[in-house]
Amino acid sequence: MEAKEDKPGILLASDPLIREIIKNAKDKSDVLIVSFHFGDEYKTIHNKRQQDLARMAVDYGADMVVGHHPHVMEDIEIYKDKPIVYSLGNFIFDQSFSKDTMKGMLFKATFEGSSLLKTDSKVIILNKKFQPEGIFNKEEVKDKEESMSSVCPKPSKDYGNLSLLPVGQYRNIPDKNYTPEDLREIKTASSTKSGICLTKEARDSFEIMTDKARVAGLNIKASSGFRSYNYQNNLMANALASGNQNAEIAIAKAGYSEHQLGVAIDVTGQTIKYDSASKKFDKTAESKWMEENASDYGFVESYPSGKQSITGYMYEPWHYRYVGIDIAKEILLSGKTTIEYLESLEQVN
């Protein structure tokens, strides 16, 4: 493996002359990058052997150290103002048994002469053919992985964004098969059970809101989120079969539900032992907190008290809809119901 005068080769890290070789290489280079084949396979944190070798290389002249072999990305260290990238992970490799082996790091270092100006790192995700699918920042990767592993349903086609569609008792969703494209599961700390989904923006805002409520000593959770056409149809059928005389003003018909848009949420609280869609939620400390604070996170009550003649539905203190912070504030100031405001917004647009 060793290098000869007429061919390239590999320097063994155990070579007793490695320090001298690195120093000599630096003396002949503007920028010296040392690449080590080292580390433990599938470990995302470097070991002591890697650290000792990488720091030694910097001590003797390396301007940057880049490692490979673990088949997963490892941490980055700045030592004496020099970057040490312990492992780049996979670029093209057939290891589909874990998320970590199906991605790698793209590390960018910008030099001016021998001076390092800046560095940046992004992530490459491999597709099913083990090819790089694209270059992403860490937040994009997190969202992509979450979407791929989500239990939430995915649309069969591109329906466009219907999040502000004024759906209600007298207005239906154009396609009964409509499913939002970016449904995400609500974390268990903010929901009464697994599998409750909202659109990503609504989900993220709801989780932030419930985290803030917990700081105030209140436990607010979602008991229902996205509902498909078939789910809503069965819900109505069961209510009618059980003799519920208020079914038509208490439950939306299939295709007429805000829940199918993925932005409507039923909330509950610890005070009522997390009962779902319960009138007992009214006047609780959790209900009062929602009334006072929900708009700060983009949520408004869809069916407020005394507005049945407008909404077509009975008062539901537990039912909130995400419309975004600006619109939520405007709805409160206008004194209109959510459906009235969204219809007026639609007419303007």
Image (tube, rainbow, N blue to C red):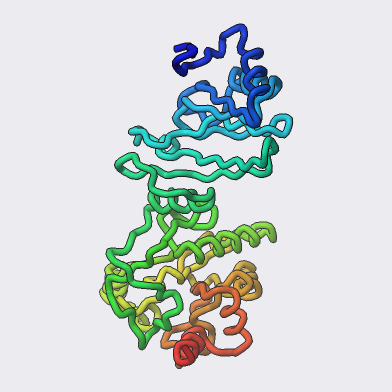
Q: Quadrant of residue 14?
A: top right
Residue at x 29%, y 66% (from the top left corner) = 157
In the image, farthest residue toward the front: 6
Q: 252 or 45, which lies in front?
A: 45
Horizontal arrangement in the rendering, residue 144 relative to residue 155 (left or right): right
List x then y, in percent, for residue 202: 50, 66
Residue at x 45%, y 64% (from the top left corner) = 198
Q: Quadrant of residue 161?
A: bottom left
Residue 4 shows up from this direction: yes
Q: In the figure, 191 relative to 338: above or below?
A: above
List x then y, in percent, for residue 15: 57, 8
In the image, farthest residue toward the right: 80
Q: Quadrant of residue 31?
A: top right
Residue 243 shows up from this direction: no
Horizontal arrangement in the rendering, residue 282 relative to residue 310 (left or right): right
Quarter the N terminus occupies:
top left
Residue at x 60%, y 17% (from the top left corner) = 49
Residue at x 59%, y 89% (from the top left corner) = 335
Horizontal arrangement in the rendering, residue 241 relative to residue 126 (left or right): left
List x then y, in percent, for residue 295: 61, 74
